[in-house]
Amino acid sequence: MGVRALYPGVMRATWRGSVTVGLVSFPVRLTPVRQERGVRLHQVHRVDGGRVRHRRVCELCGEELEAADLARGHDSGAGVVLVEDEELAGLRALPSRAVEVVQFCPGGQVDPVLLGRAYYLEPEEPGTGSYSVLREVLERGGLVGIARVPLRAREVVAVVRPRGGVLVLQVLAWAEEVREPDFVVPVAVSGERELGLAASLVGAMTEDFDPAAFSDAYAAGLSRVVADKVAERQRERERAEPAGPGEPAEVPEVDIPASRAPGETGGELLAALRRSLERLRGGRR
C-alpha cells in the first residue's frame, strides 16, 4: 500500500529519483509531508481591494528595474561584489537524482534541532520490494539512514526514517548553522521535597502524546472572521438585489483555550507544585 492509499488527497511529487544503499537502488518520488491550510491574507488597497504588488527599485538611483537588470551580489563592507550565474553553476549540486544513503545510526543520535523540511518517500515500480525491506530493517533496529540528496540545485544532508508504514526523508541543518546558547543557567540547589513534588507533578501529567488534541485556534478564528465577512457581504447583496430564500452559511465554533498563569519560582515553588498536583487530582486540568 503506497502513501497515496494511506494518506488520501492530492499529493504532488516535487522530486523523482532513486534511493541507493550500497549497490541496491530503487525508484522513488518525494512529496511534502506538510500542506498549506487555512485562510491566506494578502496586502490590498483599502479603497478598492486591489492586490499590492512590490516593484524592484534600486535604492541608490531610484530606477525601477526589469529582470534583465538584476544581478546577485554580496556587500563585503568595502563594496558590493557581484557573483555571476556561471560562477554559481559551478557550485551547484551535480545533476544526480539519487538519495544516497551513506550511513546508518540509532535514531536517538539525531538532535531534533537539526530537523527541517520533511518529505514522504513513495516507492515506484519495480522498487516496492526493496523499499519495504529497508523500512522494515530500520524499524526493527530503531535506526535511521543518513543520506546526501540534491534538492533545489544544492546538496543537502537528510535523515531517512520509518513512519507509519512508509519512509520519510527529513532535511537536516548543517552543523555550523546551529548556535550554542549564549547564556548560562545558574545551578540551583533543590531539596528532596521539591524534587519529590516535581516528580509527582510530572508523573501525574504524563500521558501519550496525541497531536490531534491540539488545534490552531488562530487559523480557526481567522477562518471564522473571514466567513462572517463573506456572509455579511452576501446579505448586503441580497438586500440590494432580493433573491430567493437561502440558508446562511454555518460558521464553525472555535474553542480557544484560556491562557495559563505564568509559572511561579523562588520561595513559592513548593506551594505551586502542591497546587498543581491538587488541580490534577481534583480533575481540573
Image: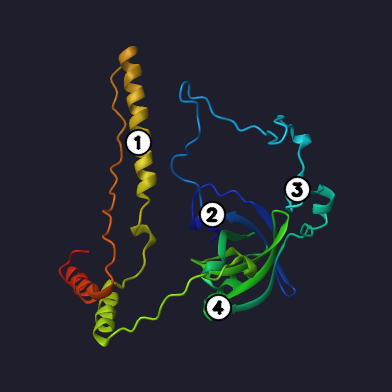
Residue annotated with mark 4: 109
Residue annotated with mark 1: 225
Assign the C terminus to one quadrant of the image.
bottom left
Residue annotated with mark 2: 4
Amino acid type of the residue that numbered disc 1 sits on in the rendered structure = Val
Which of the 4 image quarters holds residue 66?
top right
Mark toward the viewer: 2 or 4? 4
Mark toward the viewer: 4 or 3? 3
N-term mark: 3 or 2: 2
Q: Residue 238, how many percent across, how many down?
A: 33, 17
Q: Under tag 2, what secondary structure?
A: helix
N-term mark: 2 or 4: 2
Spatial CA span between label 2 and label 4: 30 Å
Location of residue 91 with respect to 196 vertically, above or below: above
N-term mark: 4 or 1: 4
N-term mark: 1 or 3: 3
Q: Is residue 53 left or right of residue 260?
A: right
Q: Is residue 153 left or right of residue 285?
A: right
Q: Under tag 1, what secondary structure?
A: helix
How would you rate the neighbour count of disc 1 (Cα within 10 Å): few for under 14, some for 14-19, many for 20 or more? few
Spatial CA span between label 4 and label 3: 38 Å
Amino acid type of the residue that numbered disc 2 sits on in the rendered structure = Arg
Q: Residue 207, how many percent across, how many down?
A: 31, 71
Q: Residue 228, how many percent across, how many down?
A: 33, 32
Q: Under tag 4, what secondary structure?
A: helix
Task: Mark 4 and mark 3 in contact? Answer it, CB < 8 Å.
Answer: no
Spatial CA span between label 4 and label 1: 44 Å
The disc placed on residue 237 is: none
Task: Mark 1 and mark 3 in contact? Answer it, CB < 8 Å.
Answer: no
Spatial CA span between label 1 and label 2: 33 Å
Q: Name the residue located 58 percent from the left edge and 63 percent from the top edge.
A: 170
